[in-house]
């Protein structure tokens, strides 16, 4: 006779296995019917038989379960190889249950009794542990390599932007307007970076308010000129800080108009320009106010301020008392529909600004026009309105800018030698259905637009996505670098990372490709009333997936939600990149968030290498036909949703759209990790030399464990002549340092809030600082805060800060 306790445990275990078998078997039948793997059906049936045998106390239950363990192990390795994190959910329920069945007090009552009853199952568990243990030492996704070192004759390089920049300063969003995010400072090196400590912390006290939208973010990169740092907070409050101590010198509050319907509430940075009177006179203008050094601050309610960099006072000769209304000439002027979120470009004469337009609200929204204003007076000099047949037409009593012209929501790059501005453009909104777009609205969408900075006239244009239905705009400031060719010639190149994962490499003089990007056939079958381009350009330098996803790539926290992800995957339309949006629901991968976002690349122009942080999160795009509760036209006073995900109305088109990341029932990505990486690129060969997973689950998991799966990031990297790169931006709260040569992480420190921003570095009083803004990101789900944190080596450590 077996004990009452043993009998209870046997029957309870049998019930659990029977329930698991029913779920796996039933879900497996559904998946098989959809054309997916039939393994779950067999697994469910075996579990039901094992449950029956346990109920009858037969020892064959253990033998059959052992066979199942071996089968699952073989199937897992066949599908996932020795990638531990891809293997894990395939066995994370079955293997613990197998261990449970090995316990004597659970199965000692099986008959006929034998000391060998548990041996096959024990062997299966040992084999599984050996496979999983081996997989822990492997990472099939990792690419190891070594980037070239700096040449012996290396010096400070100023590719593209010929304006001299003091080695210790960071006076523009990308340090120079070439968008390289490179500092010539060398005090911090791979050898001493572990000595970095917090030097000072500043708090803006600008926190989320009750009437803020969900998309409130702190994405600012501070700039530094002379002995002062300048940065803006989410409500566009401008702060000037002492560069050595972080003490506030002055602040300016533009008192923006905002409400929860704004799609964004963010400020990525401000622009600085020094305009001494003799320089102004050389351009034929005078400055009657005292703003020889000025800060240009864009605000989300459609204004641009010019402020004295020394005092924060308005530059009274600029516009109306230091302020421009950027909604002038717009077809609609409702606050929140046009939002300049990124710093403008400044030249010796001009301030050139673009702005974001609300995504996916309607076919009647503001224009995405780029405008050039006189730097001193604020007078409008030129416009480039991409949706207008004559894009340079200025507004007048009889003309407004074109509704829904393609916009540019991130900072442009500027080549002072060529006097050309390079504008990354987006798509005409609404983004996900384009049947009513005009040829003019398509002409300059989703590409790189090069304009003469003095006149706004087109120099060239290259389109990275044709008839974009996926919001695959160019999301980042291009990087300008003069690349030395094998024959010794130097080519002025432009590197444009795109959401598609492609990096387009162009000659910035004329826009011709330096790296091939052949037109490649893509899936067809547009939604009713729309059309598709038969081909799309695929750059040879790319992080896009080389193979289509399959249901074997689906993931989950357990075998059960992995099965659910497989079913959802098979229910959607997916034929690889550029699968068109559909009423069925389309899997978009690379997703709407993009493989590259607004952080862009960091380029070392001396070593001719780049540091990147690509991400890989699929999205779901499901068109919602018009019908009850889904009208064609917006209600009176209708406003956006305050977010870029979820149901978006797309008024004026036949469809609304539901956009969201592809997540399991447990709220984790359905695609197997990694979801975020760091990567090194050799710009002379345009090859990816190394790539490693980046970031942990510490702050996004219900369990307090930091598993290095490789997680998404929003923000960008910087690189230094000292051979160290810095990156925050991940969904866990860390600043990290990397050896640029190998990509190996060599230091990290815990941040007080989400660091969805790009750091910067500068030198003050012989000491190199690294500064990060850590205020979190609403829709990214990281902790909100109001911190600006500066790191430095202890005083007296490190070599000279400059090169």
Image (tube, grey):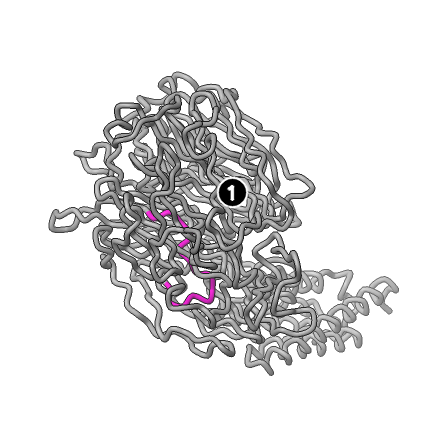
Q: From the viewer's perspective, is 420 left or right of 768? A: left
Residue drawn at x 72%, y 77% is 48
Q: Name the residue at the left extreme.
A: 487
Residue drawn at x 12%, y 47% is 488
Dominant SS type (magenta):
loop
Residue drawn at x 35%, y 35% is 375
Q: Quadrant of the N terminus?
A: bottom right
Q: From the viewer's perspective, is 203 left or right of 272? A: right
Q: Foreground residue, 789 or 188?
A: 789
Residue 474 falls inside the magenta stretch? yes
Q: Name the residue at the bottom extreme.
A: 33
Is residue 390 positioned above or below 613 on the image?
below
> Residue 465, how many percent across, how many down?
37, 64
> Residue 226, how many percent across, how many down?
37, 22
> Residue 582, how many percent across, how many down?
53, 74
Residue 331 falls inside the magenta stretch? no
> Residue 435, how many percent across, how many down?
47, 72
Q: Is mark 1 on a helix, strand or loop?
A: loop
Viewer can see residue 126: no
Q: Foreground residue, 171 or 86?
A: 171
Which quadrant of the view contains residue 583? bottom right
Is residue 493 positioned above or below 760 on the image?
below
Circle 1 crowding by C-alpha within 10 Å: few under 14, some 14–19, many from 20: many
Q: Residues in magenta?
A: 465-478
Residue drawn at x 25%, y 53% is 459
| Residue, disc 1 | 756
Is residue 66 positioned above or below 458 on the image?
below
């Amino acid at each position: 006779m077996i004990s009452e306790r043993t009998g209870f445990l046997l029957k309870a275990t049998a019930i659990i296995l029977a329930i698991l078998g029913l779920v796996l078997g039933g879900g497996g039948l559904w998946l098989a019917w959809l054309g997916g793997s039939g393994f779950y059906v067999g697994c469910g049936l075996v579990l039901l038989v094992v449950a029956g045998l346990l109920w009858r106390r037969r020892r064959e239950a253990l033998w059959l379960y052992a066979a199942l363990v071996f089968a699952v192990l073989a199937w897992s390795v066949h599908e996932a190889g020795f990638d531990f994190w891809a293997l894990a959910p395939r066995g994370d329920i079955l293997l613990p249950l197998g261990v449970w069945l090995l316990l004597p007090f659970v199965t000692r009552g099986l008959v006929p009794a034998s000391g060998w009853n548990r041996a096959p199952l024990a062997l299966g568990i040992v084999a599984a542990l050996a496979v999983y243990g081996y997989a822990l030492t492997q990472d099939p996704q990792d690419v190891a390599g070594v980037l070239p070192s700096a040449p012996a004759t290396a010096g400070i390089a100023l590719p593209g932007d010929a304006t001299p920049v003091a080695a210790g300063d960071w006076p523009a969003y990308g340090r120079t307007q070439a968008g390289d995010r490179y500092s010539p400072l060398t005090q911090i090196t791979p050898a001493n970076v572990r000595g970095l400590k917090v030097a000072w912390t500043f708090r803006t006290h600008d926190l989320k308010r009750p009437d803020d939208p969900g998309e409130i973010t702190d994405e600012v990169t501070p700039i530094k000129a002379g002995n002062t740092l300048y940065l803006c907070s989410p409500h566009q409050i401008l702060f000037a800080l002492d560069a050595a101590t972080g003490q506030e010198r002055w602040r300016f509050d533009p008192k923006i108009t905002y409400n929860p319907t704004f799609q964004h509430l963010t400020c990525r940075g401000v622009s600085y320009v020094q305009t001494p009177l003799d320089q102004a006179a050389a351009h034929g203008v005078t400055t009657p106010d005292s703003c020889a050094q000025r800060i240009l601050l864009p605000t989300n309610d459609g204004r641009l301020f010019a402020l004295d960099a020394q005092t924060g006072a308005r530059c009274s000769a600029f516009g109306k008392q230091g302020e421009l209304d950027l909604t002038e000439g717009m077809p609609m002027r409702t606050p929140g529909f046009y939002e300049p979120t990124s710093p403008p470009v400044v030249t010796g004469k001009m301030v050139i600004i673009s702005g974001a337009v609300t995504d996916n609200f309607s076919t009647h929204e503001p224009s995405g026009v780029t405008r050039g204003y006189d730097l001193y007076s604020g007078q409008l000099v030129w416009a480039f309105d991409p949706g207008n047949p004559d894009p340079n037409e200025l507004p007048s009593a009889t003309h407004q800018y074109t509704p829904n012209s393609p916009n540019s929501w991130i900072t442009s790059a500027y080549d002072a030698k060529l006097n050309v501005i390079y504008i990354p453009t987006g798509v005409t909104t609404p983004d996900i259905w384009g049947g009513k777009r005009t040829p003019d609205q398509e002409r300059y969408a989703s590409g790189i637009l090069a304009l003469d900075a003095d006149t706004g006239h087109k120099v060239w244009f290259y389109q990275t996505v044709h008839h974009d239905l996926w919001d695959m705009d160019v999301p980042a400031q291009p990087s300008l670098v003069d690349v030395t060719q094998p024959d010794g010639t130097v080519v002025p190149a432009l590197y444009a990372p795109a959401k598609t994962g492609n990096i387009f490499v162009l000659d910035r003089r004329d826009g011709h490709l330096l790296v091939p990007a052949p037109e490649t056939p893509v899936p067809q079958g547009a939604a009713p009333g729309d059309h598709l381009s038969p081909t799309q350009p695929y750059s040879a330098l790319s992080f896009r997936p080389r193979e289509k996803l399959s249901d074997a790539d689906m993931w989950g926290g357990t075998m059960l939600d992995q099965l659910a992800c497989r079913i959802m995957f098979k229910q959607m339309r997916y034929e690889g990149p550029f699968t068109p949006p559909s009423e069925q629901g389309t899997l978009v991968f690379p997703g709407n968030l993009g493989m590259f976002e607004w952080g862009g690349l960091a380029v070392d122009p001396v070593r001719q290498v780049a540091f990147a942080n690509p991400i890989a999160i699929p999205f779901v795009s499901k068109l919602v036909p018009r019908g009850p509760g889904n009208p064609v036209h917006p209600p009176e006073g209708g406003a956006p949703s305050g977010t870029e995900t979820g149901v978006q109305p797309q008024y004026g088109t036949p469809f609304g759209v539901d956009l969201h990341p592809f997540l399991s029932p447990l709220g984790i990505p359905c695609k197997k990790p990694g979801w975020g990486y760091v990567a090194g690129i050799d710009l002379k060969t345009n090859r990816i030399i190394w790539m490693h997973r980046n970031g942990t689950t510490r702050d996004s998991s219900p369990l307090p464990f930091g598993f290095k799966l490789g997680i998404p990031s929003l923000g960008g990297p910087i690189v230094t002549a000292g051979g160290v790169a810095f990156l925050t931006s991940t969904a866990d709260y860390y600043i990290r340092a990397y050896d640029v040569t190998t990509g190996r992480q060599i230091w990290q420190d815990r941040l007080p809030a989400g660091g969805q921003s790009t750091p910067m570095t500068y030198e003050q009083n012989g000491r190199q600082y690294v500064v990060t803004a850590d205020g979190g990101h609403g829709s990214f789900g990281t902790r909100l805060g109001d911190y600006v944190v500066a790191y430095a080596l202890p005083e007296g450590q490190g070599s000279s800060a400059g090169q």
